[in-house]
Image: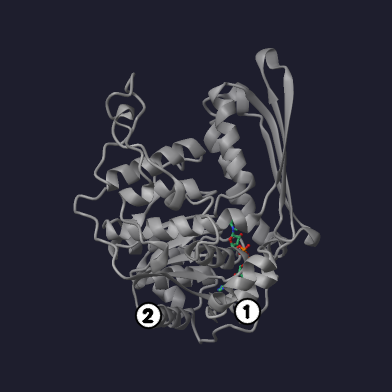
Amino acid sequence: MPDTPIAAHDGTLLVLTPGMGAVSTTFMAGVEAVRRGSAQPTGSLSQLQTIRLGARSEGRNPLIKDVVPLAPLDDLAFAGWDVFADDAYEAARRAAVLDERDLEPLRDFLSTITPMPAAFDQEYVKRLDGPNVKSAASKMDLAEALRDDIRSAIAASGATRAVMVWCGSTEIYLQPADCHRDMAAFERGLKENDPAIAPSQLYAYAAIMEGVAYANGAPNLSADVPVLEQLALERGVPICGKDFKTGQTLMKTAIAPAFKARMLGVAGWYSTNILGNRDGEVLDDPDSFKAKEVTKSSVLDAILEPDSYPDLYADLYHKVRINYYPPRGDAKEGWDNIDIFGWLGYPMQIKLDFLCRDSILAAPIVLDLALFLDLAARAGQSGLQEWLSFYFKSPTTKVGHIPEHDLFIQHLRLKNTLRVFAGETPVTHLSEDFDEAG
Ligand SMILES: NC(=O)c1ccc[n+]([C@@H]2O[C@H](COP(=O)([O-])OP(=O)(O)OC[C@H]3O[C@@H](n4cnc5c(N)ncnc54)[C@H](O)[C@@H]3O)[C@@H](O)[C@H]2O)c1
């Protein structure tokens, strides 16, 4: 936690997004609409949420953005990379998240944001093939080209600093390999084109080397390897991940804590999704789905703790499916059947049908992560930022730490960290009459 004052926000903050698809363009369009006064930043804690400071009786409940020095929306600029050359307006039209009537007034702004050529390899995203791709002899050359891009984009936008939020596709499932052990092994892997190094890792490496904070919105391994975590620490760069917590997992991590709090058993949890956007198409490939399945599946065990409550949760059957169904586009349907049991083992069922909009839920997360990571950087924080777990399906933690999935504990931790950033006392809810802080 900061022991020196947080450096003031000054000048433009450039938000870099590898991937300019549905999530990224919905984020950019939304920020611009809010700036023009034609929309509300609904879903964004950084813009809308208040935070209690001190004792409840003091009645101090300012907005988060008035308590910590976040970059104002007017000072954000955007740049990104994509495999397709469409500018942000064309990409947003193609993604069809926003209606024509919302998009058209933003055309002048969005069409100025054109993607830089991607560091991409179809080996890692089988269902994608596009023309706007860099070619280079080695992965090291690609990483150097990305570093050049970052420097040029910062210079072109006149920004004083940048953050990067991965909004690119889900890559195939990869596990840490030898080349992820330390810097010497990683740099050798980059030069020798080690297949264990995926494109998303090139972006993460380039960002950290350039002192740019990095968040990973997909389940990709990306910065989640010892060498990049160490590099982030050494270079004083905050990082966090992974996989935005938006629809079904948001619900799961809100409901599961209630079962555990009430000591109700769970016999089974069947979750299925239908979605028809490009993300759904990519996830239709079994190798990309595997990466998503792993991040989506781990949450229940972490919340319900079957080792501590074997009678209630050890036999829980948890199944997660994602089905590509083009007619729905970005309007995903997440359907959960939950078999729970109560007193004397009597069974009950809960059916949850969330007709959600994927990118509408994800866009404010991109905004909050960009602003909070920038704050963390100015507060002198480096390495993994576990206090941002709130935003992720599969929070990345330091070695030896257990990831926290419970949405409410994550939320408490997020707000307490912001209180500490603001020089205030964390709230523990222990004080009986709330007359004192805590
Ligand atoms: N929308 C959600 O609710 C949600 C939730 C959690 C995670 N995510 C993840 O966020 C990511 C973005 O989702 P989306 O709906 O915007 O998908 P999308 O398919 O609309 O956009 C992803 C874009 O990334 C591009 N891309 C792929 N590899 C790239 C690379 N190496 N470099 C640059 N660009 C690359 C693709 O061409 C595509 O335009 C996905 O990985 C998705 O799984 C989304």
Answer few, some or many: residues within 10 Å of disc 1's Cα (few below 14, many 20 plus, some between 14 and 19).
Answer: many
> Which of the 4 image quadrants contains residue 159?
bottom left
* Residue behind mark 1: 84
Q: Position of residue 386 (x, y in %)?
A: 40, 48
Determine whether the beta carbon of the residue marked 1 sits less than 8 angstroms from the nearest atom of ligand 1. Answer: yes
Give the CA separation, mark 1 to mark 2.
22 Å
Instruction: Please tell me the numbered disc located at residue 151.
Output: 2
Question: Is any part of residue 384 visible from this angle?
Answer: yes
Q: Residues at badges 1 and 2 in contact (C-beta under 8 Å)? A: no
The answer to whether residue 189 is left or right of residue 175 is: left
Answer few, some or many: residues within 10 Å of disc 2's Cα (few below 14, many 20 plus, some between 14 and 19).
Answer: some
Compare marks 1 and 2 and give the one earlier in the sequence. Answer: 1
Q: Is residue 136 above or below residue 199?
A: below
Q: Is residue 344 above or below residue 52?
A: above
Residue at left offset 56%, top offset 49%: 245
- Camera-nearest residue between 81 and 180: 81
Please state, as top left, top right, bottom left or bottom right, where the C terminus lies in the image: top left
Report the amino acid beneath label 1.
Phe
The answer to whether residue 403 is left or right of residue 288 is: left
Residue at left offset 66%, top offset 14%: 343
